[in-house]
Amino acid sequence: MKQTGKKVLLLCFWLLLLFVMQQTQIMSNTLKLILQYIAIYSIMVLGINIINGYLGIFSLAHAGIMAIGGYTSSLISMYLLKAPFFFPINLLLGGIVGMIFGLIVALPSFTVKGDYLAIITLGFSLLVQSLLQNIDAVGASRGLRPIPKNTNIFWVGFTLLLAIILVKRFVNSKYGRSLLAIRNDPVAAELVSVDVKHAKLVAFGLSSFLIALSGGLICHLLSYTNPGAYGYSLIIEGLIMVYLGGVGSITGSILGATIWQILVETLRFIGMWRWILGAIILISLMIFKPTGLFGNKEFSLQWLRQIMRNRKEKRAIHDE
């Protein structure tokens, strides 16, 4: 009961803080915008990490799923449910449509593995981008505008909190344990009665739902979107943030998104060279720290105490 009470208090404090940040000018608009970028991409990375981290499948479908979620929620906001109070419903509908396509993308993972699955998911992202570039009904290469600017720091913060809770509960459920078993040894997982196909479907569904939500949020933040935003650069960015922060880690997902977004903003003056820097970071991580900074770990006070205890023991051994 005490733990539940603490969680409720923390939740209320978080929502109150978001409301105050939205309604007052306690921070500059620039800082508020950067925080919204960090939160939105944290949601996207949490979604990618379910597949690439917890399940251990190298998927490149996140750009296509984000485009589907963004365009769906934007079109609904522009032509159907136009009032601002429908915004959460529009986001939810975009997430559901993205989830449906994610379930379709999951089907090849039943029979195809490794590089072949990576190529299929890459093809899916490029196919979605190509279709959006050639369909006049959704703006073709011109893109969509004006999308209602309904995204604010309250909705972004609330959605991030929801994403964290969903992923944490999922990871600690039987599905999360099934994913870890599949990642370690798919054959052994099947031998101990793990329903591999069902676990993959659930993982792809939740992953796509979160990625599609992030697409809806970013479109309603910028008030504009176009197919060019969902190409190779977004695919690479997603991978950098996942493998920078750490695979199989909620903490790592948020940390990776935070570090990369800060780098993108601070290095904007060097133009396209920042993408070269991103490639160098990704290559270095793959060589020297493949699981990332927080790979398969979560930040907690207990973890911090353990780190401090280990350092003290090493220092004591060195002094002797």
Image (cartoon, helix red, strand yellow):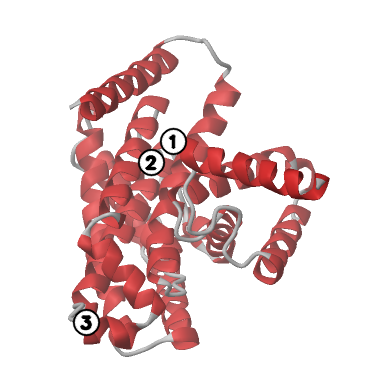
Label annotation for residue 221: 1
Dot 1 surroundings within 10 Å: few (below 14), some, or many (20 or more)?
many
- The residue type indicated by label 3 comes to Val
Which residue is found at the position 82% from the left and 44% from the top? Answer: 319
- Can see residue 74? yes
Farthest front residue in view: 320
Left or right for 285, reference 35: right
Which residue is found at the position 58% from the left and 57% from the top? Answer: 237
- Placement of 137 over or under 126, stated as above or below: above
The picture quadrant where one finds residue 191 is bottom left
Closer to viewer: mark 1 or mark 3: 3
Where residue 304 sits: x, y (%)?
55, 39
Which residue is found at the position 51% from the left and 38% from the top? Answer: 37
Label annotation for residue 192: 3
**Disc on the earlier residue, 1 or 3:** 3
Residue at the disc numbered 2: 217
- The residue type indicated by label 1 comes to Leu
Mark 3: secondary structure: loop
The front one of 211 and 197 is 197
